[in-house]
Amino acid sequence: MVGPKSQTQPFCNPILKLIAAPSLNSPRSKPAEPLKEMEVETDEKELKAAGAVPLTDGRFGLRIHGWEIESRKRSILNSSSLQLWEEKLRTSHLPEMIFGESSLVLKHLKSGIKIHFNSFDALNGWKQEALPPVKVPAAAKWKFRSKPSQQVILDYDYTFTTPYSGSETIEIETEKCGREETSQRKCSLHWEDCEEKINLISLASKEPILFYDEVVLYEDELADNGVSLLTVKVRVMPSCWFLLLRFWLRVDGVLMRLRDTRMHCIFEVGENPIILRESCWREATFEALSAEYLSCQPTVFSHVFLEYEYQVQICWG
């Protein structure tokens, strides 16, 4: 059994396994197509048959087989909140659109372990990684000015690339003075390497989708020089849940970058849940792609991440 690195262990812990990223040389059968937005209509009969119960009090999500899964979509940070974030992160540079109160939360009720995704922790990862800035063509650098007379000095990672793969806390309910109280503390879950893989075939099956949502955490258009985007989407079926956290970057004429984290948990009665996590990073320059493909069309660039994108396409259907 694998649990958080703390002295006090909860009653039942999910088993957390880290999967090796897929190889660039692995076989692929056909080109990937862009992922499409899913439209899901929940059937009450399907929810009941799967043992799922929708969340109440205006919350968007459900409870199923010991898990509580909830997505929260809120508006972008206002100026006062943005200033507070700048102080906490010790930076004057943040993405144009930060959905600071938006999140995806998956909580295992028996153990209290909560895996969640939010923009603050993701940007904290960006700040700590502190990648060198991607070089921008001189003709486009002026777009980063906020004032006509301002000198542009890109001495930070303006792409907001993050190594973030999720946040982990543990919540334990205790009884105090005749009432239940919830204490929460951050923890570092131990992920062990494994040879197991996420079963893409089972994810491609025609199981009913009990819950689906996509949450945007932050976005920046890089002063019209491209796009930087962090999103997380989740899908819950009667047999499992599956999620994809994706950072996508395109600096026009310079670079494309993809950082994906996938998690998968199969519902198994009478056993501790096992969570599989897989992270995959891809990066390519426009120059290298032009040399290989002799084209700078976006449709050609989409094939750079062909094999991995195809796997994700299977997962989401």
Image (tube, rainbow, N blue to C red):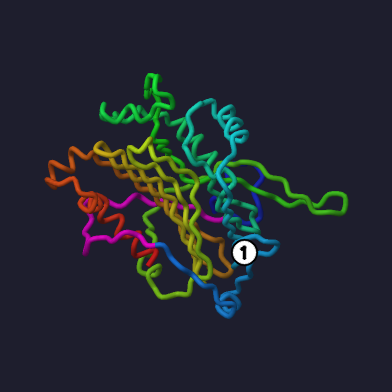
Residue 77 lies in the magenta stretch? no
Would you identify the image quadrant in which residue 259 lies?
A: top left
Q: Amino acid at mark 1?
A: Gly
Out of 78 and 200, give the one closest to the viewer: 78
Residue 276 visible within the image: no
**Residue 19 higher or lower than 157, as above or below:** below
> How many residues crowd mark 1 within 10 Å: few (<14), some (14–19), many (20+)?
some
Q: List x then y, in percent, for residue 41.
A: 51, 72
Residue at image location 31% in from the left, 38% down from the top: 251
Instruction: Quickly name the residue at label 1.
Output: 66
Q: Is residue 200 above or below residue 181?
A: below
Residue 105 picture location, percent across and down: 58, 53
Q: Is residue 29 magenta?
A: yes
> Mostly what secondary structure, the magenta segment?
loop
Magenta residues, start to end: 14-36
Could you tell me residue 90's position as x and y percent?
Answer: 54, 25
Residue, x 61% and y 61% (percent of image)? 60
- Closest to the observer: 169 or 253? 253
Q: Residue furthest right?
A: 177
